[in-house]
Image (cartoon, grey):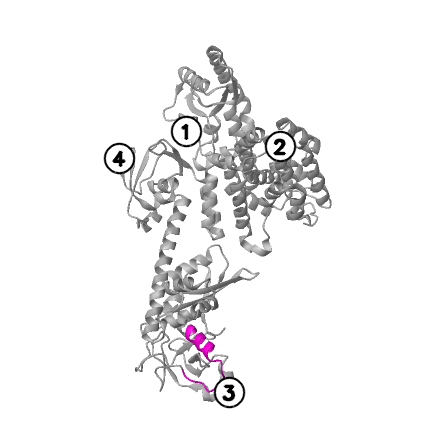
Amino acid sequence: MTEITPAPAQSSLRRLVPRIFSRAAPREGLEQLVRTVRAHHPKGDIAIIDRAYQTAARAHAQQKRQSGEPYITHPLAVAQILAELGLGPRAIAAALLHDTVEDTSYGLDQLTAEFGDEVAMLVDGVTKLDKVKYGDAAQAETVRKMIVAMSRDIRVLLIKLADRLHNARTWGFVPPEKAAKKATETLEIYAPLANRLGIQAIKSELEDLSFAVLHPKIYAEIDSLVRQRTPQREQYLETVIDAVDTDLRELRIRGRVMGRPKQLYSVYQKMVLRGREFDDIYDLIGIRILVSTVRDCYAVLGSIHARWTPLPGRFKDYIATPKFNLYQSLHTTVIGPNGRTVEIQIRTHEMHQQAEFGVAAHWKYKERMNGGKTDAKAADADMAWLAHISDWQAETADPGEFLDSLRFEIGAKEVYVFTPKGRVIGLPAGATPVDFAYAVHTEVGHRTMGAKVNGRLVPLESSLSSGDVVEVFTSKNPDAGPSQDWMGFVRSTRARNKIRGWFTKERREEAVEQGKDAIARALRRQNLPVQRLRGQDAFTEVAHQLKYEDVTALYAAVGEGHVSTQSVIEKVTALVRAQEDTSTGPIDLPAVGRSRQKRDSDSGVLVRGAPDILVKLAKCCTPVPGDEIVGFVTRGSGVSVHRADCTNVSSLMQDPERVIDVAWAPTTKSLFRVHIQVEALDRSGLLSDVTRVLSEHHVNILSASVQTTNDRLALSRFVFEMGDTVHLDRVLNAVRRIDAVYDVYRVTSS
């Protein structure tokens, strides 16, 4: 990374949102970092932190931040955030080094040699992938790489969140377009991930900073309104807190009562999504009560309900049933003094640590218990959803689909249901018994045939609610499997991927058998020796020629209609004949069947005077019925048919003895290869729309290529086979109607 010059200051943003123009404070030095780490880990290895700082300072010596500060202030700030969360020395060392591999000449191998595999793995997990190599998919693949790494060690995500948080504090120094893009990504991915990990301290600040960048005027307006209401709110809070303190003294419970800070983004969300006025939102007073034991939590709850009337339906017990991110607390809403509504949270001090620092609190505890050594498996056991995310990212090949699924998976609201044995299962809102079955186990999902909810039989597409007890019935038939209809109502990414994977595997097995049968029937019709051809590994060679992994993949392609049976047989017979006779003697036209007026083949072309000749359509010009055609005798491969205006015809005409008369004679089994080019303005989802339309018109796509020019012109070329060429016009017209497509035409030369 070359030196970055500071961007010009944006006076309006600086006035409206000063929070995003923060610079490193003097205290964020190495000494402060070491003091923070020692406070949490008195016996920790401080030497590795000092070595990591010296290495990072040397590597970033010539670099500056866009704020004009030395670059080393960024890794120091990231390390400080993690130290305050309580992470250990090796994670702090990785935070100090997290940009070295990506932005300097300091390589991962050198880092591994100097700091060990653990630190290197953490650094590699947050290192972005090369945009030149991955192109537009770089962002999605970088997030995928991080997800894979965090499934092995959650500290990878903690480092990335701390990195994003400090960068967000300095978004005022970067160009507005880039800042807005980063803020959107943060709201869609990183803030929800922080929420999933239960780290409210980071989640809330990320949301507020992103909100400030995306809507600076609204942010400043809400901030001003909050400041205006603060004196009255503080006065009312004191009244409520005094009353609660009195109850605690009467119960002889030692506790701490405090007001809950208002998050500006949360206020904005309620105003926009719920259509509420600011006064209605801000008048809702919130307090938090911290006590020593769970028993004290319930005792305080009873005392508060005895003092003030609780609102029906507003009590939630997250102690008995924790949230997906291990959050625990009692929530209740009461009508407080002067008839104003008060929200109250009651939890223990340990629960509060968990709520603020989430999984980071677990790492702090585990590192202490293991003498400074971490236990990644234990963390994974606590956060079971990490395993689910790791599973479905492996099953989702398309980068765009992966990113969309991730946004849904981490951002969706959840419902909590129970198994008959009392185990809690978290599912997306609107989930069905099928989603529940796949959350229990993949095989349970595949074999599901019915369900009971709260003891009553329900349809499989029924939506579940929090607190439901769900029991599924499974089929004992070993061939049982899911229904395609399930894809229409399942809500979880895991269930969707498992169902799709089952049908992909089933279809492939059927396609392999169909392909085998089709090739065997065609060989028998043409009196070709099936066993001898297979014995010579001719099919393996042809599979490699057609870019398939093995013969099974070739059979599957034939069965799915991606490759015509006749083209495979032609290649196999040509290969066998070339192996048996490599001489350059007279050209013999290979006979491939009994004499008949018309060949029983897929070429759709009849050679005049020689009806039994092997015929193939040239790939250079892809002729179809209606085109003027010319035939040429080839060596060992029968007759090759070209368009009369093909660029190769002039050179072939130099050998007139090989020219032969041909005529179109299509049959119901004829397949013709067609090349089309689609020209359109580049937009998101263009390729998927084009392929969907082709698929809806029963077109078997053989290959596709896409390129985008600098002026956002997308040129897509598709090669496919079709039997009825009259159908081609309908296909072209359908593609032409796609949004942003301005031209589509058949290509007649390569």
Q: Are marks 1 and 4 in contact (CB under 8 Å)?
A: no
Which one is earlier in the sequence, the residue at label 1 or at label 2?
2
- Give the crowd class for mark 2: few <14, some 14-19, many >=20 residues within 10 Å: many
**Residue identified by numbered label 2:** 83
Kind of residue at badge 3: Gln
Q: Give the range drawn in magenta.
A: 571-589
Nearest to N terminus: mark 4 or mark 2: 2
| Disc with the residue nearer the chain's start (4 vs 3) | 4
Q: Is residue 424 above or below residue 656?
A: above
- Mark 3 element type: loop
Q: Position of residue 687 (x, y in %)?
A: 46, 58
Of residue 3 and residue 425, the one placed in the foreground of this image is 425
Q: Mark 4 sits on what residue?
A: 456
**Location of mark 3 (residue):** 654
Residue hosting label 1:
321
- Vertically, is 683 above or below 570? above
Q: Please report whichever mark, 3 or 2, sits nearer to the chain's N-terminal start.
A: 2
| Amino acid type shown at disc 1 | Thr
Q: Is mark 4 on a helix, strand or loop?
A: strand
Earlier residue among tags 1 and 4: 1
